[in-house]
Amino acid sequence: MENNNQTFWDNQYQTNTTGWDLGQVSPPIENYINTLENKNIRILIPGCGNSYEAAYLLEQEFTNITVIDIAPTLVKNLKTKFQNNPNINIVLGDFFEHKGEYDLIIEQTFFCALPPTMREKYVSKMHQLLAKEAKIVGLLFNRTFESGPPFGGSQKEYEILFKDTFDFLKMEICQNSVAPRAGSELWIEFQKK
């Protein structure tokens, strides 16, 4: 499955069929980043895509950013885009095999790209990668899709999925989503128990 998954995602970048790509940092995530004072926190962006969030973090002088994606074509592009920047670590690999410890993980379209059968594994891996009392922040879809990816879900489903290992600091309908996603995203801030 791993190779098929990698082939699928790599083909999306090779053929530029990246309909989920906003072409910019998502406004809710940008607003959250603007509230962060410690520029040295360890930040991970899994399933990072074109990494607008990482670019924004670098513009804001954050110093310890790791992005990971499974698509070789994308990672090659990112290494060119961010070449010679010591503040970002670009990893080609499987998130579920990744090792490290982070203060903040930014969720932006990674969760919804995974088949729902992998969601418990996602929660467990997120918990493992986060330092004590560290957070996952970002966006989850609050709607269903005919087929995926993306795969949707609901607040009730997410509450059941995350409740044993995370405290919910925020989980609410996002008020500043980009227009195509208005009313269909939840803003989340979950802290590791």
Image (cartoon, rainbow, N blue to C red):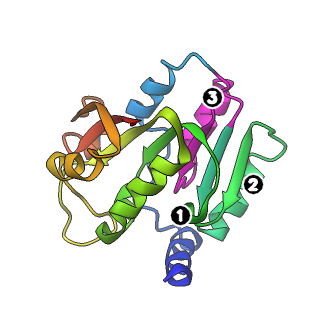
Q: Is residue 63 visible?
A: yes
Query: Which residue type does callout 2 highlight?
Result: Lys
Left of 160 or right of it: where is 5?
right
* Mark 1 closeness class: few <14, some 14–19, many ≥20 residues within 10 Å: few
Q: Which percent across, then down, holds residue 82?
A: 74, 45
Q: Which residue is mark 1?
A: 96
Q: Residue at x 57, y 16 (%)?
A: 37
Query: Which residue type does callout 3 highlight?
Result: Ile
Q: Which percent across, then down, holds residue 16?
A: 53, 67
Q: Which percent across, then down, holds residue 85?
A: 80, 39
In front: mark 1 or mark 2?
1
State the image quarter where residue 124 is shown.
bottom left
Query: Which residue type does callout 1 highlight?
Result: Phe
Q: Residue at x 50, y 26 (%)?
A: 33
* Mark 3 closeness class: few <14, some 14–19, many ≥20 residues within 10 Å: some
Per the image, label 3 sits on a secondary structure element best described as loop
Q: Which residue is mark 3?
A: 41
